[in-house]
Amino acid sequence: MSILVTGGLGYIGSHTCVELLKNNHDVIIVDNLSNSERQTVDIIQELGGKSITFYEIDVADRQALRTVFKCHDISAVIHFAGLKSVNESIDKPLTYYNNNLGSTLALCEIMNEFDVKNLIFSSSATVYGHPQTLPITEEFPLSTINPYGSTKLIIEGILKDLYHADNSWSIVILRYFNPIGAHESGKLGEKPNGIPNNLLPYVSQVAVGKLGKLHVFGHDYDTEDGTAIRDYIHVVDLANGHLKALEKSSQSPDLRIYNLGTGKGYSVLEIVRNFEKASGQSVPYVLDGRRDGDVPVCYADPSKAKRELGWSADRDIHQMCVDAWRWMQYDAKREKSTP
């Protein structure tokens, strides 16, 4: 199949594109390079063993997107494109609503125009807000505590309304927990601009000496060591979840929702200790106050995805840290060798 991947040069998108190529799909990527690099195209092709088609466009640009659909016989769309920082969304809510909602509306309108109605959407566990009980199932009440999460929840509502109005659509909503790690080659990983918002890139940059110390936000939560607990999932496991979702969505029209997580939670300090063990490097840290928009504990019940998609996460926390460290070393050397 020919799969259009929006935001396909980003962290999760790029790993998913590699897995799509390895499974003999044709891949068309649209990405505006706002938080990604053009050279990732070459890396995806090298690791996937096939060429891709890349367009540097913004998904919200309807005319540019329409041109892509005219040039390709697209079977399905995997929609990653969007701003994704919880902290930034609190400071710039209008930017997040405008970008994330606007791009999704434009995409769905053009898909409908070309009768392409197979969509996999990149949602988030942030739609569960403050979970009252654990683990979190797909049936939990939905609420949000930051604008980023609100954009995901609103888009989920848009897609549900779209399906109910026209049930010829086949839509899969994937609620991610916390993706970390990198491709086992060490050539593809997460590279955020500036100081990372996500934990493992932050830890990695401290370990490699790029940053001086890790700031641990929140150390008085009701957890064993006082730091927040999250469900961390290897990015390649997450990417493979999209392939399973694509297989499922191709069987029959429907609207389906799945958690993608491991079902196990690790605290911030547990991640630090695991990363120090995997890398052999010290990760100095300081304990700071809580951040707005963070919840104390969050981990998935991924049994529905296992039952209906035949998917489960295979890689453990040690492998996640080993792969993240391999990528960090590779990227640091690449930066030094770039004039």
Image: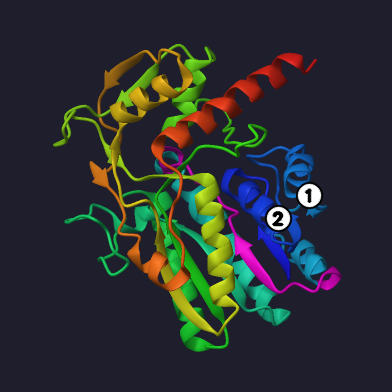
* Relative vertical location of residue 166 with respect to residue 237 in this rendering, above or below: below
Q: Is residue 65 above or below residue 125?
A: below
Q: Residue at x 65, y 24 (%)?
A: 330
Q: Which residues are magenta?
A: 70-89
Residue 113 seen in the current view: yes
For label 1, the SS is: loop
Tally of marks: 2
Q: Is residue 326 left or right of residue 275?
A: right
Is residue 76 shown in magenta? yes
Query: Would you identify the image quadrant in which residue 138 lies?
Result: bottom left
Residue at screen point 71% across, 21% down: 334
Q: x, y percentage for residue 69?
A: 78, 70
Regarding residue 60, the answer to whether it shows in the image is no
Residue 59 image point, x, y percent: 68, 58
- Cα distance, mark 1 to mark 2? 7 Å
Nearest the camera: 117 or 151? Answer: 117
Question: Taking 245 as reference, is 148 above or below it?
Answer: above
> Residue 140 location in percent, x, y?
26, 65
- Classify residue 45 as left or right of residue 139: right
Q: Does the magenta portion include 118?
A: no
**Image-based side of 239 in relation to 31, left or right:** left
- Which amino acid, by three-letter code, is at mark 2? Lys
Q: Any mark on residue 49, and which?
A: 1
| Circle on res. 22 | 2
**Amino acid identity at mark 1:** Gly
> Residue at point 73% right, 55% down?
29
Quarter of the image that includes the C terminus: top right
Nearest to N terminus: mark 1 or mark 2: 2
Mark 1 and mark 2 residues within 8 Å of each other at the beta carbon: yes
Structural crowding at the residue carrying mark 2, measured as other residues with C-alpha within 10 Å and reported as few (<14), some (14–19) or many (≥20): some
The residue nearer to you, when weighing 38 against 102, is 38
